[in-house]
Image: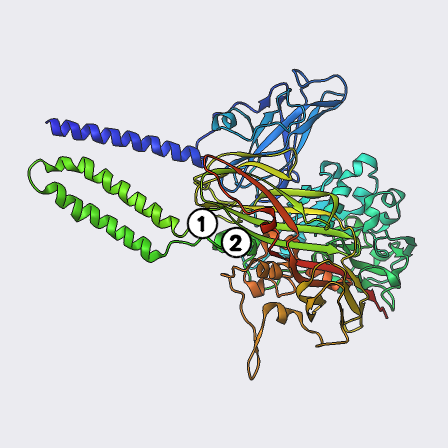
Amino acid sequence: MKRGRRGRLVGRCLRAVWAWASLLVLWQAGALPSQAAPASVDGGGPWNVRVGFQDVYRTGSWTPLLVSSASSSGSSSASGGGSAGRLCAWAEDSDGQWVRSPAMAVTQAADGTQSVRFLVRFGRPVGRVLLEQVPPEDAGGDGLSAEISAEHVAGLAPLSLPAPLPGGETVVLVVGELPSMERAARLMARDDGSRPRVVAVADPRLLGPTGLDYDGADAIIVCGRSVAALRGADAAALVGIDAWVRRGGRLVFLAGADAVRAGLAESVAAGWIPGLTNTPGRMEGMAPLRRATAIESYARADRPLDKKALQGLEVPLLADAAAMDGVIEAFEGTAPSDLPLVVRSPHGFGTITWIGLDLDQGFFRTWQGTDTLLVELLGGRPKGKSAGRGAEGARGALDMAGQLRLAVDQFPSVRPVPFEIIGGLALLYIAALYPLDWWLVSRGKGRFRLAWLSLPLLVAGFVALAGSTARQWKSEAGQESQADLVDIDMAGLLTRGVSFAGIWSPANATLDTAAVPREGLAVPPADIVVSWFGAVGRGLGATDSPTSHPSLASADYAYGPSLATLRGIPLAASSSRLLEAEWIAACPRPPLEASLTREAQGTLRGEVVNRLDFPLEDCRLVHSGWLYDIGRLDPGASYSTHGGKGPRSLAGALTRNAANAERIVATRWDPAELDPLRILEVAGLHAAAGGSAYTSSDPGRLGRFDLSPLLNVDRAVLVGRGPRGTAWRQTTAGPEAVAMPSGSALEAGSGLWRIVIPLKTRRP
């Protein structure tokens, strides 16, 4: 009887422990409702939230978050306009850890309305945000402690947001009213049925003023009528869109009759009209469009444009059309410079496609050819047999950004324990439990009490043995891995640096980190942003995973005074943390002297001279579909297209085709490639290499750095390997001293350098 009661008691205890453990797991996974305070902050009342583009946003991308309140009571209120305190926003990274934003000032208007704007990255698909009031004694917000407890986070005010789009979704932002874009998106559907998500914002004043505000868009279409009347502070969104394009975005500008308006000429949008290099385009007036053959052919329209629609239709007449920067893709007349209709031109590291027709007005709204015309303006229908970005999570494969993440997560002195040793220790442990331990305690009457001593000793001994074995393959010092990309635009003297860093720690610690451009590479101040580096998809620790990653270092961390520094990043013993940084600034001096001319057949003629302080290894000059092998280019050395080997196929060189006695055999992209610079090389010219038809995967977030569109718009790109362009500054703290690589060691590696060179085009 006593044994039966004891067994029932033990069973009840085990069930209770199991129930509490299940509740703990569900709470960590976010399945249970939060018990935090209501959505209000001291002195702020209930807050209204606007996130992304019309509340459409996606995981993994920088997202604008505008919080506003009509209440002006309490300590945060102030008479008249001005600042009403400071707030911080909290969002989860891909591991489910909360990240605090820099403190931002709350602006209070004269009518009492309060608002504050944040930039955050959502690493989880739940769309949770917490709001925190900065103490009045910390007016600048710089003294906020990086030591954050779970109780502190639980006491913050939660904000209710709509669910985000998956990180692999393609988003097309339309500024204005363009109903045809929804129909065009259906024509851009991939084999799996996924198609771009179209988000229309009629009022541009609802959009953000910085380039990062548009990180969640893959392409932007701007209707001229919607931006022609914007002036002063109302035109801040145009400044943000322009900065986004310079970072590598794709912009389609629909400006027909609106291109000659005075308001448009006074705004940033004037620089989107084709003209000479770094010069806004000029209009010589309006010219009648008598025939629509060129537009119908360019759009590949099934139905011709109604001839009645051409009555009274006029298009802008561009000045200096024969010498403008870019490529005329559609024109009316006998020569491209007679009456350009569609011009694709470079703008920083991005491209702008201008069309001199108001597709958002009149008969273009109902013409079916407008749908296919928009598809061509956006680059055409998807090519290749890839399932597309939208299906990445379903098929379970990594995109190229995820492949780069695996490559960065490799460290020279950190090796995995061989499986043979792990399997041997597991078998030995099983044998020690049974029959060895069982044999020891079962011999003789009453020896079963020895199990209370033998079992803990066996467990402790094997834990110590496993830890000692693991240390044989792990370094006792911190390890670093880094992949760098440096881009320089010679036309606008603009430089961009991208760095992906992996930090491995042998002990529990916290990390403070910041990234700065290489000395002499950028004119200060540079626009720098540092963040976590996460994979897209539904895998463990990915941005669309339904559950958070059960990290051993599950603790929250914070930004410093700006997005350029992170503080208190938790590091678990024998684990790594992956980070990414991007900066953009003016270039102090041209890196090359170039006199390259594009010949009629697309080849290059001229030379380049290296004006950098270091040599570039494994150099290649690429343009259109051609590649020139240069090799090593020392400081002061020159290369001429007249000497050496002639050009060869760019796609063949990027894919590293192998030749045998009879034919050229195309090699497949290795999804297990772990050379970071090789991954950046292919992703940085992904479309030129054949796109997903070659790699069988999409570039993911690395698609922002694809310079392939520039190769066909009067630009050549010099690609080579040089020193790293970004320096990481890291300090650690914790109970054990962790020796991290020094600054000189971090800068000793190599990075991929790409220099965009403007060409002198010989037009017919």
Judge whether residue 66 can be spotted in this image. yes
Judge whether residue 304 can be spotted in this image. no
Sequence order check, earlier mark of 2 and 1: 2
Badge 2: few (under 14), some or many (20 or more) residues near its Cα, within 10 Å?
many
Asked whether 237 or 293 is in front, the reply is 237
- In this view, 733 is above or below 115: below
Residue 6: x %, y % from top left = 16, 28
Image side of residue 160 versus residue 440, left or right: right
Asked whether 528 or 170 is in front, the reply is 528
Q: Name the residue under label 2.
A: 392
Image side of residue 732 versus residue 255, left or right: left
Image side of residue 677 versus residue 616, left or right: left
Quarter of the image for the C terminus: give it: bottom right
Callout 2 touching callout 1 (CB < 8 Å): no
Residue shown at 60% from the left, 54% from the top? 748
Q: Residue furthest bottom?
A: 661
Residue 145: x %, y % from top left = 57, 28
Q: Is mark 2 on a helix, strand or loop?
A: helix
Indicate which label's residue lies in the foreground, 2 or 1: 1
Q: What is the C-alpha distance between the residues marked 2 and 1?
A: 35 Å
Asked whether 329 or 630 is in front, the reply is 630
Q: Which amino acid does label 1 sit on?
A: Ser
Q: Count the labels in the image.
A: 2
Q: Name the residue under label 1.
A: 475
Image side of residue 31 versus residue 600, left or right: left
Q: What element carries label 1?
A: loop
Asked whether 336 or 145 is in front, the reply is 145
Q: Which amino acid does label 2 sit on?
A: Glu
Which colouring convention does the figure follow?
rainbow
- In this view, 150 is above or below 491: above
